Amino acid sequence: MEYGAFPTDPYSHTPKHAGAQQPGMTGQVKEEVLTRFGELGMRVSGGVVRFEPGLLRAREFVTSPQAFRFLDVDDQWQELSVPESGLAFTWCQVPFVYRLDDSAVPGVSVVLDDDSQEALEGLSLPAGLSTELFTRSGRIRRIELVLGRSRLLSE
């Protein structure tokens, strides 16, 4: 499923000085957006991002490489290649690429603005990198996760 651009800070309610106002997002749309990030396994607790994709299904991953176009934190259009058995989306204007590989150790790799990569143990971002993500500082350019099918929802 692909989502287009949508506002995340909708205006809503009726101001005292005006008639009824249509909110920027309906409750249904907001619920679907929040649900989807839950399915993708995005969890935030204590300022730390954790990845728990237990509601994601293997059939959502592409079967052949595909291009993914997105607007980065510098408001520039970018394109990256999503590998076979991959899935891509953006969060805080940072691309996330999940890749299924049952032979690899699950892990996270963060690509930084100087083209260096930081390999992390486990499936979480430390508080400092989580803050860089949330503030859209531009330091994080891409986040890649390698997962085994056993971490996903069985079909």
Image (cartoon, rainbow, N blue to C red):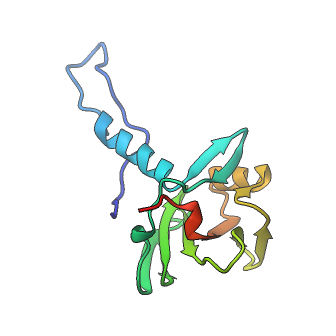
Give the residue drawn at x 60%, y 78%. 101
- Say left or right for 135 vs 25: right
Quarter assignment of residue 140: bottom right
Give the vertical position of 61 relative to 52 (above or below): below
Nearest the camera: 33 or 98?
98
Q: Position of residue 118 (x, y in %)?
A: 78, 71
Quarter assignment of residue 112: bottom right
- The number of numbered badges drawn on the structure is 0
Nearest the camera: 79 or 75?
79
Give the residue drawn at x 73%, y 38%. 46
Nearest the camera: 126 or 62?
62
> Do we see residue 115 in this rendering?
yes
Q: Residue furthest bottom?
A: 64
Quarter assignment of residue 110: bottom right
Q: Residue furthest top?
A: 16
Give the residue drawn at x 28%, y 20%. 14
- Say left or right for 20 vs 88: left
Give the vertical position of 104 relative to 150 (above or below): below
Q: Position of residue 128 (x, y in %)?
A: 79, 52
Q: Quadrant of the N terminus?
A: bottom left
Q: Quadrant of the C terminus?
A: bottom left
Nearest the camera: 94 or 137?
94
Q: Position of residue 47 (x, y in %)?
A: 71, 42
Give the vertical position of 130 relative to 139 (above or below): above
> Do we see residue 77 in this rendering?
no
Q: Position of residue 127 (x, y in %)?
A: 77, 49
Give the vertical position of 105 relative to 67 (above or below): above
- Say left or right for 141 vs 79: right
